[in-house]
Image: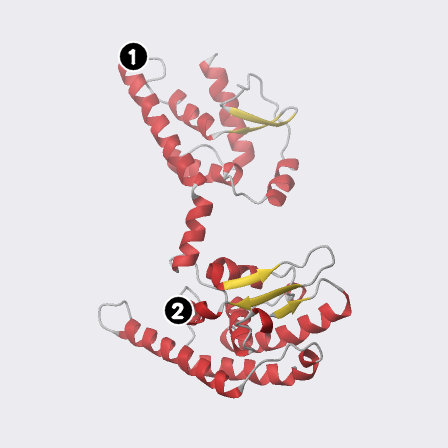
């Protein structure tokens, strides 16, 4: 392997695919995650890999330094980026103990990198369940609250996820109208994709399930069969606490108790407006007394969280 030719080829490919010349090694390896992260979105990868230009340089080294995407189209692997770093150093032409130590350092760096990437999915799920990862987005929190208001806390009172047909569209519109009212109060400038306001393929329900784990039961609608969704009765106290916690944290504007009351009451009012549409399918289970208790519990949690944030030393301004 000609070191100069290899360095030129790897540097050229890196610059072409990353849009910048190699710089700091650790920062560049973080950029490489775009391609090599094991949970990278397949659709995005396909689109961007197809857009790669063919490489015109000679002497492109093979694996493990590069990954051939298509004939004459390559990516520099994390190992290849380390090789760029090594060949650019003053030790490349000085074999010996010092070089062995540098190569060992690269091995440790790559081992740590791949370990971090491989654990990303499980750690993100654990973080969601523990509440240390990003909180529920407001529309997803609205979905959970709407289920609680409607007492969908037992399979017998579950909300039906119609697999298709006019029933699906009618129930989706009736259920998400209250969710929309809730989100409009707490996030008035938020963009709403109405195409995703569905109980079968929309993102809100699945985000709630990732955050709440087994506390939210979701039966899939497959093969023309209808599904169901409900909050497990024994999980309700924890679900209420988690939703309140998520509404009170994050980088967005927090749900103050006053704003929450306005949003919650709007959700309940709209749910009662939609009663005829949902009642036609036996899907209305709301009881004003239970709704009042739920409102009080959520408000109590939010008030406690706000008071805790306002205490000296907790970062309140």
Image location (x, y in percent) of residue 202? 62, 61
Is residue 214 shown above or below 243?
above
Q: Which residue is mark 2?
A: 245
Alpha-carbon span between mark 1 and mark 2: 57 Å
The residue nearer to you, when weighing 299 against 193, is 299
Q: Residue furthest right?
A: 165
Q: Residue furthest left?
A: 312
Q: Secondary structure at mark 1?
A: loop
* Colour scheme of the rendered structure: secondary structure
* Residue 24 seen anywhere in this rendered image of the structure: no
Q: Nearer the viewer, mark 1 or mark 2?
A: 2
Q: Is residue 234 left or right of residue 228?
A: left
Which label is found at residue 307?
Answer: none
Image point (50%, 39%), residue name: 37
Q: Which residue is mark 1?
A: 96
Q: Is residue 273 left or right of residue 303?
A: right
Is residue 12 shown above or below 238?
above
The reply to whether the C-beta atoms of the residues labelled 1 and 2 are less than 8 Å apart is no
- Which quarter of the picture shows residue 89? top left
Image point (47%, 12%), residue name: 2
* Residue density around tag 1, few if under 14, some if 14–19, many if 20 or more, within 10 Å: few
């Amino acid at each position: 392997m000609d070191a100069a030719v290899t360095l030129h080829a790897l540097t050229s490919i890196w610059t072409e695919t990353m849009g910048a010349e190699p710089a700091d090694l650790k920062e560049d390896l973080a950029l490489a995650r775009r391609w090599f992260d094991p949970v990278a979105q397949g659709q995005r990868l396909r689109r961007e890999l197809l857009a790669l230009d063919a490489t015109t340089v000679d002497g492109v080294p093979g694996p493990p330094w590069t990954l051939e995407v298509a004939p004459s189209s390559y990516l520099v692997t994390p190992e290849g980026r380390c090789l760029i770093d090594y060949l650019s150093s003053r030790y490349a032409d000085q074999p010996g103990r010092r070089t062995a130590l540098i190569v060992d350092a690269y091995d440790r760096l790559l081992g740590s990198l791949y370990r971090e990437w491989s654990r990303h999915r499980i750690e993100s799920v654990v973080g969601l369940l523990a509440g240390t990862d990003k909180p529920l987005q407001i529309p997803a929190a609205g979905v959970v609250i709407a289920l609680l208001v409607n007492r969908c806390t037992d399979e017998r009172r579950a909300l039906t996820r119609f697999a298709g047909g006019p029933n699906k569209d009618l129930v989706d519109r009736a259920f998400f109208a209250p969710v929309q009212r809730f989100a409009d109060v707490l996030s008035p400038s938020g963009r709403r994709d109405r195409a995703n306001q569905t109980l079968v393929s929309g993102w809100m329900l699945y985000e709630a399930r990732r955050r709440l784990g087994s506390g939210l039961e979701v039966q899939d609608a497959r093969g023309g069969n209808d599904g169901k969704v409900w909050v497990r009765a024994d999980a309700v106290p924890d679900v209420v606490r988690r939703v309140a916690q998520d509404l009170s944290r994050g980088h967005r504007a927090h749900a103050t108790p006053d704003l929450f009351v306005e949003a919650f009451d709007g959700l309940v009012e709209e749910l009662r407006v939609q009663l005829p549409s949902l009642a036609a399918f036996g899907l209305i289970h709301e009881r004003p007394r239970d709704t009042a208790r739920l409102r009080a519990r959520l408000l109590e949690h939010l008030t406690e969280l706000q008071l805790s944030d306002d205490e000296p030393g907790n970062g309140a301004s």
